[in-house]
Image: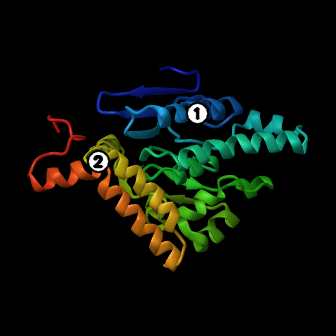
Amino acid sequence: MQHPLFLESFDERGVARLTLTRTEVHNAFNDQLIAEMTTALKGMEEDPRVRVVVLAAEGKSFSAGADLNWMQAMAGYSEAENLRDAEALAELLRTLNFLTKPTVALVQGPAFGGGVGLVSACDIAIASEEASFALTEVKLGLIPSVISPYVVAAIGQRAARRYLLTAERFSAETAYYLGLVHRVVPPHGLEQAGEDMVEALLKNGPQAVAACKDLIFAVAERPATPEVIADTARRIARVRVSAEGQEGLAAFLEKRKPSWIRDED
């Protein structure tokens, strides 16, 4: 489906793709893009056919963050109006981060500010060697507030204390060492690297993948208290007796493919 600001597609495997197309402004955000992306992602969440979501962009840049015209308009807004705008971006990032479907970001070029937020909110990120990153808000006397929970979760507090405060631009290789991206590939290899990741995800039980995402959020940054241990035991017990868990175990024992893998895979 063609939107004014991005392209939405879906294939027979259950792979949904959202491609930013505002190339004339380096795929920068404005209020319309934020609202339409949020709606599209919520639709993918609710569509039982969708198994993987890929986030990509056309043009030289992945996303330059906030659109300059939008920022200029926001400068004249009241604090209450600014709060509503910030809450809309927060809802986009929350939706992307907590999507039950696995998400893969393909970063072909520079990602600044909110663009880094989008990458951080995806489960898996693959970058071209031509990609670069920066959290430039402080250069404008602003702060990367709404994206910070996802960025700090991705790169850790120590790296955040450098890159959020200095607004330095850093390379795809540095992003890899920080944990922001999982692979760095030559530009011509980005789509294939993304396809390889998608194929790996499609081999796994879709309900188990969703349960795994929820499990990660439940245990991250928490000590192994009796409550956490009890919760993890309950989770695996539920999954073992689920229809998908039973099918997966049966397929393994019977040396056949489970039902969620297509015959041609």
Q: Is residue 59 visible?
A: no
Q: Amino acid at mark 2?
A: Glu
**Label 1: element kind:** helix
Q: Does residue 158 sit above or below 192 in this rendering?
A: below
State left or right for residue 149 relative to residue 55. right
Quadrant location of the C terminus in the rendered image: top left
Residue 249 relative to residue 114: left or right: left
Q: In percent of the image, x 54 and y 31: which residue is there?
A: 40
Reply above or below: 158 against 102: below
Between 24 and 147, the residue placed more toward the observer is 147
**What crowding class fits label 1: few (fewer than 14 Cα within 10 Å), some (14-19), or many (20 or more)?**
many
| Residue lying farthest to the left in this orientation | 255
- Tell me the SS state at disc 2: helix
Q: Name above or below for residue 188 compared with residue 230.
A: above
The percent coordinates of residue 100 (x first, y second) are 46, 46
Whole-percent x, y for residue 55 in the image: 46, 40
Q: Which residue is mark 2?
A: 244
The x, y position of residue 250, in whole percent, is 16, 52
| In front of the other: 125 or 86 | 86
Residue nearest the viewer, comparing 177 with 24 = 177
Q: How is the image coloured?
A: rainbow
Labels 2 and 1: the sequence-earlier one? 1
Say which residue label 1 marks: 37
The amino acid type, in three-letter code, at marker 1 is: Met
- Nearer the viewer's eye, disc 2 or disc 1? 2
Report the residue at 44% width, 57% height from top.
181
Residue 240 seen in this snapshot: yes
Q: Is residue 199 above or below residue 225?
A: above
Examine the image and state in which quarter residue 49 appears: top left
Label 2, residues with CA under 10 Å away: few <14, some 14-19, many ≥20: some
